[in-house]
Amino acid sequence: MSFNYRMILKFISIIPIIMGLSMLVPAVTALYYGEWEEFKVFMALAVTMVFIAYAVFYFLRSARGIIRMRDGYLIVFTGGLTACLLGALPYLACDHTISVIDCLFESISSLTTTGATLFDLGVLPKSLLLWKMVCNWLGGIGFLILCVSVLPAFGMEGKTLAQSEVPGQILGKITNRTSDSAKYLYIIYIAFTAAEFLLLWMGPMNIFDALVNTLSSVSTSSLGDINQTFSHYGSFYNDVVIGTFTLLASLNFTLYFLIIHGSWKAVLTNIELRTFLFLIVLGAVLVTLNLYWTKTYDFTESIRYGVFQVISMATTAGFSITGYADWPSFSLVILTILMLIGGCSFSTASGIKVIRFLVMCKLIARGFTRRIHPRSVVAVKVGSNAVSALRVSYTTVFIMVYFILIVFASILLSLQNLDLLTTLSTAIAMISNVGIGFGDVATGNFSIYCEPLRLVLCLLMIIGRLELFTVITLFMPSFWRPDKYRNY
Amino acid sequence: MSFNYRMILKFISIIPIIMGLSMLVPAVTALYYGEWEEFKVFMALAVTMVFIAYAVFYFLRSARGIIRMRDGYLIVFTGGLTACLLGALPYLACDHTISVIDCLFESISSLTTTGATLFDLGVLPKSLLLWKMVCNWLGGIGFLILCVSVLPAFGMEGKTLAQSEVPGQILGKITNRTSDSAKYLYIIYIAFTAAEFLLLWMGPMNIFDALVNTLSSVSTSSLGDINQTFSHYGSFYNDVVIGTFTLLASLNFTLYFLIIHGSWKAVLTNIELRTFLFLIVLGAVLVTLNLYWTKTYDFTESIRYGVFQVISMATTAGFSITGYADWPSFSLVILTILMLIGGCSFSTASGIKVIRFLVMCKLIARGFTRRIHPRSVVAVKVGSNAVSALRVSYTTVFIMVYFILIVFASILLSLQNLDLLTTLSTAIAMISNVGIGFGDVATGNFSIYCEPLRLVLCLLMIIGRLELFTVITLFMPSFWRPDKYRNY
Ligand SMILES: [K+]
Ligand SMILES: [K+]
């Protein structure tokens, strides 16, 4: 049983076309700001990539055949790898740095919507900065498309669990045809982008800053420290707009399909949504009170900064208030927990995902009941739906692997002998794609790490974004030689 | 369905008798060192406790009836509570402190074999110090008895899992009668105690120090920082003896039954033992190399201190080398992982336990296989035995609850606003009953915490020792009113 390489290559050839076309945005920016060197680079790359990729696509246009689960894994992995490599080219070609690893890091950080950086964003040429933000945006929509098209076929249980929450009839209407769902996705995502851009531009931001902030927040990627970088102007209005749209981007996008179909009731009773909002409200109240009681800020500022930072972490966006890493320990613990749980499934957010967290809670509740009544048979229910034993087992394994991965990442990162807080929070920030940590990495700048560990960070971001299994499965022998492992 | 209160009380009345008799040891010590005040207190308490408890026992001697699982829970919980309260009396009566909470903390810390303290052990009257060590020792044997008598009946899966590793025939011979196993347990435990005591006394220690060190190491309780307290003399010989006996105490005691019956083969092929030793060797090699390469110590010292500290953490004993908390981050991460995994089941060690860690690893391996072959049905195997689905589910829930508990504990402890490292490591040190952490709690002295949080620490130690479920189950409504929850 071999892979359908022609089909896989055909799929992947679409990626350079999209990325090439996207490079026209920074190209225009370079032109506007007179960055001639960058303009030439972006134009040359765009033309080359589109031309070659289109040729490959045209050559393979007749490729047909069934995409098996194993082919799907390979498409996701090599497609993602291609995107990361291409995304790194502009940094390298513009001579901003001579380190290939650094360029790869920037590209991977953007496409996984992590938003971490090794550069000083303040001095980066504007066109390159915008390219980073465009990659953020592409990463966001890319993951959503992945969710709706490739992943369900091979059982990413996060989304499937969430769908079992939505009335079957409506769901059937919406997702009957993948291409239809994908179309809706583009429309919703672009609508959010346009709306946020206009709102920010109307406010105190100029057009460039509005674009940068929009692209990084609608994809829950962030810019790191909002005050230290730029364009924030300390404006409360900006806080509200950015906070709102990161939140919208981290909700389950099925809900927007439902709203389009007028099924408000299904939205309002959605258990994942309710849990997520409950967690955010609870977190915001606790952090606000803690900030106020410890006299970190006055009452108004406590609310403003507390709520913003809680939303920023829970959505795994990772915008940060200057000095938030020096907040009292209680607030930091709450923020870390929210960061680990992450956003809703089928959104641009990352982390464990609220739906898996819910399954875990239910599983634990059942565990206690079973202790007293060992012969009881109770299904794990989320909302009104029973979750199958296989899905429960997927979820528990997922969560365990998540924590084990954090542990392994910490072991590797600790080799540099930074303090434990920085080490551990880097591991969490990378795997949950939040992009900011505590200690020395509170600003979202990870240049403190040495080159080999920067590669480790890249790997962690990819593993986090692709929900662990896709990546790790590739390293299992039974994936490559299924005929040898028939007994399983 | 009510509880069998008479039987429960009869069981519990044995505890004051044992503890009263044990008080004769510090009483004799007080006499020897001329601590008259302490002598009077210990004698008065001993006589009163034994007298009253024997009266209760005599009065209830005719109590009969079945001990149901629910009764068992209550015996464990109230019995443990009684022991903790009685253990605190000498500190209070000797006027060493006026804080009831502090006395309770010392008592709980000893009986759970955590070994943490709020006092300055160096200035504590010798008889009181010895009482703390006697409580350590009682806590160790107490937990072993619990494992062999009460816990299996209501499914503490750690031990049961481990037993499935032992050939059924031999196991049947050994554990057919609980009272027999218990007798073997006493003999083995006392033999270890005697052997270590003699070995230490033969070395550079005086008799008192040898006793103190023996009682605290054979129960994996520790004394905190071995250099800062006393009696260590910087002796390599002492390191070896203490290290060996903490290691022996943290192995599955079933193995000693097997050795007594001459079943060496079953011992040598035991998967839990092999895994535990593998983890320790791996950890020791990694920490030693790390210490040497970072020039923390020279090569010989790196081996000596590295191996000792790894054994101390993996067995959840918690003896510490002065300044170990300033070791490079890599070593600290390794030590933390070993601390979380803990020792073997059915030993005086605490933590998640190696057998559960093994089940988790197997479960994850199966999870990956299932991703690629969703229809495959593979049982989780430990060694050559398949683990039932119910036990697997118990184990996963246990591990999840373990981590959630660490998270909740961190939230509570962070209210005092110590640094995050101290906060998190305190939570782990308490729940895994290790008794030392990093940051401000590296010496095993937790007096940095305020009174209300000291109570939280007490609770965490108890929950950790009683393997979570016993405690948490008590707070479930269905435990108290099973008739109302028939449907489960
Ligand atoms: K992010
Ligand atoms: K201990």
Image (spheres, coloured by chain):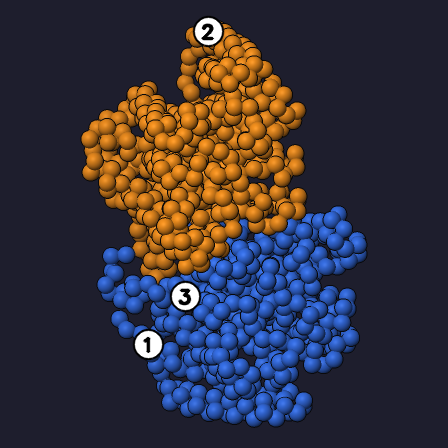
Chain colours: A blue, B orange
Q: Is residue A345 above or below residue B384?
A: below
Q: Chain of mark 2?
A: B
Mark with earlier residue (1, 3): 1
Query: Which residue is depicted at the point 55% across and 70% down?
Result: A447
Query: Which residue is depicted at the point 22% across and 37% down?
Result: B266
Residue A407, horizontal then vertical, whole percent: 46, 55
- Residue picked out by circle 2: B58
Q: Is residue A415 above or below residue B120?
A: below
Q: Tags 2 and 3 in contact by the CB under 8 Å rule? A: no
Residue B308, horizontal then vertical, whole percent: 39, 43
Q: Chain of mark 3?
A: A
Q: Residues within 10 Å of mark 1 (few under 14, many from 20)?
A: some
Residue B277, horizontal then vertical, whole percent: 32, 44
Front-most of residues B241 and B417: B241
Q: Is residue B419 visible?
A: yes
* Quadrant of the image occupied by residue B458: top right
Which mark lies nearer to you, 1 or 3? 3
**Label 1 amino acid?**
Asn
Residue A471's label in the rendered image is 3
- Residue picked out by circle 1: A4
